[in-house]
Image (spheres, grey):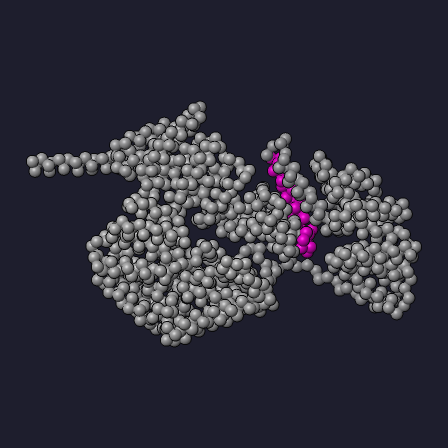
Amino acid sequence: MSLEQVQDLMGRAYALPYGEARTVLTEEALRRAEELGDPRVTFEVRMELGSAYEFGGEPTKTFTTFSRSLAEYDADPGALGESAEHQLLWQFKWIVYSLTRFPEVPLDRTRAALDDMERRYKLGGHSLQAVYGRRARVARHLGNADAADRWFAMWHTTPRDELSDCAGCDPTGKVDHLGWRGRDEEALAVAEPVLREDLNCAEQPQAVLTSLLPVFLRVGRPEEARNAHLRAYRLMRSRLSELDSIGDHVEFCARTGNEGRGLEIVQRHLGWLDRAPSPYAEMRFAAASALLLRRVEEAGHGDLVIARPVDGAVPAEVAAGELRGELAARALDVAARFDARNGNDHQSGVIRALMEAEPMLDHLPLTQYDRRPAAAAAPAVPAPEPVPDHAEIDDLDALLDLGQEEWTAGRIDRASAAWRRYDELASAAEPTPLQVARRADGQGVERFDDDDIEGALATWERAAELYEQAGDLVSRQAALGRVGAIRCGQGQADVGLPLLRTSTAYLSEHAPGTKRAFSAHMRLTGVLLNEGETDEARALLEALVPEGQEQAGELALMRARALVRTDDPASAVPLLHTAREALRESGDSTQLTEASLMLGKLLAQLAGQSAESGPEGDEQAFEEALAVLDEAVVSAGTDPWMATVAHAERGTLLVSIKGAADAVPDLVEAVAGFTAAGAGVQASYARLELANAYYATGRHLEAAETAEEAAPLLARLDDPHSYRRVRLLLAHAQAELGEEQAADLFTELAGEEGEDPDFAARLLELAAEVLTRLDKDALAADKFLEAAEAFAAAGDPYGVVRARRASALCRLWCRQAEQGLAEMERARAALAGLPAEEEAARTWETARVSYDEARLLADVGRLDDALARVNEAIAAFGSLDEKDAAETAAVLRTDLEAALESREESREESREGNDAEA
């Protein structure tokens, strides 16, 4: 057993986040340290194991490691090194905190630990600021407000020292106290400096943001509450040790009208209850989940099925209402255990209040496109005219004529009013066979309008039979044409097309010039285009002669559809202009919107593909496309679907020509509209574009949240490009947020089949950069090596040099300088692979290798070699006129020269001392 093996295990452990893997490595390091027999090494590893237990979700195990370390220190303080006292006194804070979270630990033991902590702090001459903070926390746990206030005052006014909690955690504890006491403005004042800091603490900023959730809501700062929830939950959602704080986020969702998101959080972490880090965490999460489920139940969804994890088995299904009862009972049972230990009912009261809490806001949108439960205010539109009941009309044919007129005009509600009056009169009369047929035709319209497609088909087929019996073959063929069009839409073209062709031919011969004949042609050509029969469709359209502006616009629009499918889509542009003019004049806003959408998309596509016109011409074409889409947004009016599509198209175009910031409002409307319509696929694509716009404007948190919402559905679609794009976007957003998951996602994307080799290598490099920014330098070094090998396979010599040099530096930062030097030698060898003709680039890369190698050489004490390398770097930077780089290298040279001079002076003094002794 060797010290190097212990250090290697600990180095690997340090590189991992707190959790099972890190704990296992540290436990193995402790076992080997004990075999080594070095008390100082054993003590240090055991203290690190206590940290792994505390932050890995197993605080009860910290009691054992701490007690043994404390006993060893008391037995022989001098044997454990100068830092031993500091380590022990620091961990004392965790122990006191953890003791209150286990009801089986007697309260006297916690008080004794506090007294011992204070005694040791005084003995060492340390500030008692941290001790007072722990006493305030214990008093708050017991519900003793007077004592908590007294200890808080001492905590807040006593000077800090090196044993005080960090600059983020200390104010967080104060925010907890002040919020509990209703002193919200003071809490905000304490937290304000923390929110502006970039803290190097595993608990921050998520801890302070979580503590501020209720404070922000109470003082009327909902946007800050929203951002705090989104940011903090992302940082803690993978950490079992944060289970009670995750419960705070469940409570936040329950009390801000975000039951849907809260339910997602409950389901994600429900399985953690059976391995909760403490009974206190179990109680808080169970109670908050019971509150959330109560809100779900009150909304009428108590029978909603929830999957409850079961160890080693398929998750069991349980109704929300039933689960609420179980979790409430569980929370109250743990609270009763705390009450028995504490000698009061404070914890039970807190838990009951939590489970009975009412909303603080009806609904706080967590995204811009979250319009639930209240929709955004719609633009003012004239109130619709009342639908008449036609009580004054007693003629059956007049009512049927009126119904058909309204139906033809697209006013189905008014047509239904005429048909209802007909039904009243027909029940007491004997309608003719033709009247019965016409009414059946209208019933088909009503069923189709109610989305009862099969019912509409059956009714129109019956109407066709009735028309035949009544001798009205024109109406019979019109009804069969509608049946044929629907069958084609259902994928039954073999049945539908013959019906459509027969219907169109008959109506052209026996009802020429009528709207029925025109509509039959439109139906047939639309189906032919969908079936890929473009030539036949175009031939039919060329033979048509429209009557009136409405038909002219509709015909031009259909002809444009046909041309867009040819090799010359640009020829559709004049037709779309014609269609828009005619439809604008006729007042057909629905088809005007459709024509504008088609023209806007086509103009944008042609502008993007244009290779002949210069940038100015392209810009003009884009501006024209935008103007057309502007009209589409307006003409869509109160039609939710068309308005949503218009916003989606305009937003996508704006990203290209105006910038992401201008596109965000349209894309937000698109996501909201598609979501409200239940169009999940379109909503996911709109989310993808919105996430891209958010990222481009530096709104990385919103980009990550939106991309995560889009990814699950895109994964299920046959669109690998979009799924890959959303994950790449998510990885970049996570990297900007400092989330380690970004490295995993970059690595996953790099390894996917079909990835461009050079880009795959760049993705691995990005993963390594994420890790090194998070001080995971050992992992980063390995990942940079992986990237270097990928760059070599891709034939990118610059990437090889860059990645190997970065790997070497990571070794320096994780105290493995000798390994770093070996890797830097490989980076220097890789310089030979750079193109000879690119002299400036070769010089730059060589200079960077020399500079970084000098840093490594200095770290291992080879100062003369380091000075030689840095001089090479300065000369190379100077030859490229890279003044900043040369100045940076010159600073290192000055430091090296000073170190060499100091070393020489020490040697001279040593020689003089030896001579004197001689």
Q: Farthest residue toward the top?
A: 837
Q: Closest to the observer: 792 or 798?
A: 792
Q: Closest to the observer: 114 or 847?
A: 114
The structure residue drawn at horizontal position 90% and vertical position 64%, both measured from the top left corner, is: 431
Q: Is residue 760 left or right of residue 128?
A: right
Work out whether residue 389 can be spotted.
Answer: yes
Q: State yes or no: residue 637 in magenta.
A: yes
The structure residue drawn at horizontal position 7% and vertical position 36%, both measured from the top left corner, is: 918
The x, y position of residue 83, in whole percent, is 25, 53
The x, y position of residue 281, in whole percent, is 43, 64
Q: Is residue 392 left or right of residue 243?
A: right
The structure residue drawn at horizontal position 46% and vertical position 63%, both measured from the top left corner, is: 273
**Total marks in image:** 0
In the depicted structure, whether residue 491 falls above or below residue 400 = above
- Part of the protein shown in magenta: 616-642
Q: Farthest residue toward the bottom?
A: 344
Q: Farthest residue toward the right?
A: 471
The x, y position of residue 489, in whole percent, is 75, 49
In the depicted structure, whether residue 207 falls above or below residue 843 = below
